[in-house]
Amino acid sequence: MQNLLLSFLLFTPLVAASIALFIPPGAAKGFRYITLTSNIIQLALLLMVIIGYHSRDGIQFIEKKSWITLDLGPWGVLQAEYFVGVDGLSLPMVILSVVIMLITTISSWTIDKNVKGYFLLLLILNSAIIGSFIALDFLLFYLCFEFMLLPMFFLIAIWGGPRREYASIKFFLYTLLGSIFILIVMIGLYISVHSPESPGRLVHSFNMLHMKDESNFISGTILDPHNVWNIGPFAARQWAFLLLFIGFAIKLPMVPFHTWLPDAHVEAPTPISVVLAALLLKLGGYGLLRIAYPIFPEAALYFGWFVGLMGVISIIYGGLNAMASHDLKRLIAYSSVSHMGFVLLGIASVTAEGIAGGVYQLFSHGILSGMLFLLAGVLYDRTHDRNIDNYSGLYRKMPSYTSMIIIAFFASMGLPGFSGFIAEIMVFLGAFKSGSINGILHESLAIISTSGLIIAATYYLWTLQRMFFGPFHIKGNHTGEVLVDLDRREYLMLLPLAAAAIVFGIYPQPMISVIDPFASDLAQFIMNARQSITINP
Amino acid sequence: MSGEITLPDTIEVITESAAQFVPELILTSGILVLICVGLLRRGKSLFSILSAIVFTASLTTILIHWPTDEVPRLLFFDMLKADSFSSYLKIIFDVSGLLTVWMSWSNHKLSQRHSEYFAILMAVVLGAHLLVMSVNFAMVFISLELISIGSYVLVGFAFSKKASEGSLKYFLFGSVSSAIMLYGMTMIYGLTGMMNFSTIDFAMQLINTRSSLLFIAALMTLGGFFFKVAATPFHPWAPDVYEAAPMPVVAFFSVVPKLAGIGILTRFILVLGVSGHSSYDWQTLISIVAMLSLTVGNFSALWQKNPKRLMAYSSIAQTGFLLTALSSFMDQGVQFMLFYASVYALVNFLVFIYLQYFESQGIHSLESFSGVGKTTLIPSVFILIGLIALTGLPPTAGFTSKLFVFSSLWESYQASGKSILLWLMVFGLLNTVISLFYYLRIPYFAFIKHGTFQVKTDFLRFENLLGLLLVLAILILFFNPGLLMGWINKINFVL
């Protein structure tokens, strides 16, 4: 039981989906409750994982079963495994996924168009998300990573807003382009890597842990670290890192690959925006930390300044765009771009603080962006209008709503006492330190990036002032009567997130003690790689 | 080949060869039976059943006579070669034949001249059988013409003005390319003095002949094969022909003649390459053709409004992927190409079965798919899975086959360091993204657009059962590609 927990976590939604398949489409309630049940079972399983997790033990709850073993004669054996586990990077992401998916289900309660299709897709999406966070086999990861696209495409395209068709296609094409880049590297990696578990036979393995170890590379292959293979201006391994970086940066998203995000967010229905912002974006940062950095450490160091610079550009550019947005969802979408820039900056610093800050930011942004999109959805449900300029003095009509907004805004702009602050302060620490201990990032990058906080404060406070304070009036075809305050269901989905934002801001230690071993190991591993590469060029 | 060949020797060779030639003999007698029965009886069901029996019999005999010996057998005085490579392709042809028979039986537009229709269909399959076994230029030409002439007639089987036009276009294109190919073959014969291209002597001649005429001659010969597989720049016939032909014939065309062409192309190009000793870079040539086919096929497909034309351009792009597998010039690449071809055949039939189903419901353009997903859920979901597999997304076998193709390409690049292979990989993968755009168009209209499509059908149709089988096959081959790959692996390529 103990060692099957992750599989249960992964397959519960799929089982629920296959049960739901046989419920007649008319029974709308059935689908809601079956999804909710599956989410609650997942929550229980998650608690068991958390209780059994020891933060110092590295990867835990490992399950390893053979999946595809293909004997290709002289060419060797192609081996992909069902290989899952959690460590200090994936556990926060899994916690986030389970909680957000539960809240998404509650938020989806009001969906009444083609309920069966909606919840089936949501359940499939749930499995795919959990799967990509726990997979330790590249093929398994890629399967889950790709398998998210199709449900997401239909969820945006069928249940979305007026320009949903454009937005969903754009989302699909952008992310598919990103995953193609990842696919190229995956093919190159498994051809170059030999599994050490079966000596005497040539076994091409998709195991990500094998890919980390440079002694597993078959000598003479393109990605062999001891045998530099140049393609144009860069070495093959540097190209591979760049491809992975762009692939995950599209998902993250990083400026200039971010343009799909505002469209997708604005057009997606509220619950799907929540999943998109809180979970799917996290895969970008997760992929960098799980795949790009550990497998190509020396290339990661080589491009370290570039990653950091793109992070800073995303922080500033995303923030400025948010400031110029008139649509509330678009504003939140651009603020996501800005916040994800902090993740990049933290990772690029290759310090324990920076990486831990990046992971903490992933987690914290998951909570906060989820909350922000839910709040935007609450207003949209009432008025079907998200234009910031059309509202003023909402505080007078919806006091509880306004207090929730204030919590979410303040947490998101990184005010002390909220989770965003902890994440950003750690990123800054890492970025400042990087200049003196490993020389990857110049101090100026850290200094410039702090202005991101000012920009965030500007657009959030300005929005607060424009929409919520001052005399009450609204523009548009609706009267003030539709503006009722939060109901019980909305409290149910907002309060846990608000509580989490505060708890993880005041007492971050439990989460940090989970993340920290991973972050310091990774920073250590990457810096060691530099030494070993410079000794044997 | 020297010395007197006496009559008893001849008879002995013929009887020995005939033992290896049973599937083809069955098909030949099947054609005769169909024509004779057609003189006496009419009725589509009768001929469908007869042809299904013939294809099944041929399929069974291929499996019984599966070549186990390491050394391939040469039949009929070195005209044909029976090896596991050709046997494997022949299985695909016969299965495709069976599926086409079933599609034709349920197609209501094919309402006359059934005995001729099925006889010609069988003749084309026979031609495909012979083509993939041929190792002699004369035999190649004869079997290619057997396929071509049958195809010209099949295109016109809707008996409409458009069908005749398509048939005539195909005929004109086809005869020109056959002529070019024949000219190329005669030049090769003139330069080497040999008709049989699978011998060591022929390979030696290729290495020793420095004449650039040889390059031109081989190029012309390849042109004929490229025409059959609809590779750019020999592709313009495909959209018109696909649009004009009845749906079962389109499905058939997109698989059987194409894979037969790929089969002979594989044999010929590996001979031309003489395992790297050739003075010309055939690998680059194949790579360029593959790149062109991918790009032209995919970009042209973007603008199509008719599902048949869309599938025509899709099939051009898929040819590009088959050639990509071939361009690695390794045994492994050819094996992966066979895997790709098998998956492609399954997926293509899945898509065409449902295109035919929707056509019978009066849907002829992409727009008219609007709202179909709500009333006919199962066909729409199955066609979605088929198109996703053609794009090459997991969890379908389409992904596995693309993964294999690009693996062999990467391996080949690693071995040779030719940058054209790297470019081919980049082109191929980027084309996957482009192809998604048009492959999603049918599901896009079906699920997302609102329409007035009101036909409600029952789930338990034979189409859905067959579709379910194909869908399961496509999914199972993703989760366990070893089922098929283990078998393909045993195929040897002593060419």
Image (cartoon, rainbow, N blue to C red):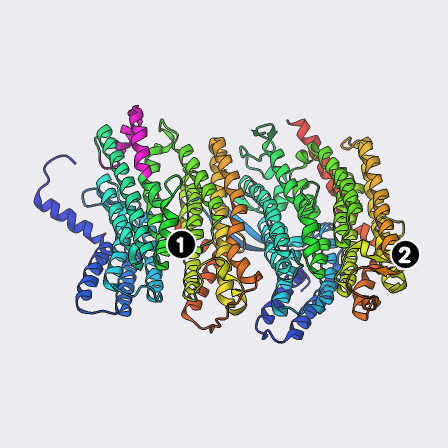
Question: In the rendered image, which quarter is residue A189 located in?
Answer: top right
- Please tell me whether mark 1 sits on a helix, a strand or a loop: helix
Chain letter of mark 2 equals: A
Q: CA distance from mark 1 to mark 2?
A: 65 Å
Q: Which quarter shows the C terminus of chain A?
A: top right
Chain letter of mark 1 equals: B
Identify the amino acid type marked 1: Ala
Residue in the picture at 32% in, 29% down: B215
Residue B293: x and y, percent? 43, 41
In screen coordinates, is A248 left or right of B130? right
Where B199 falls versus B403 (above or below)? Answer: above
Residue in the picture at 82% in, 69% down: A487
- Whether discs 1 and 2 lie on one chain: the answer is no
Identify the amino acid type marked 2: Phe
| Magenta span contains residue B210 | yes
Judging depth in this view, the residue of B28 and B168 nearest the camera is: B168
Where A40 falls versus A195 (above or below)? Answer: below
Magenta region, residue range: B195-223
Q: Which residue is mark 1?
A: B345
Where B273 falls versus B21 (above or below)? Answer: above
Judging depth in this view, the residue of A75 and A138 nearest the camera is: A138
Q: Which residue is mark 2?
A: A469
Residue A342: x and y, percent? 78, 43
Q: Which quarter shows the N terminus of chain A?
A: bottom right
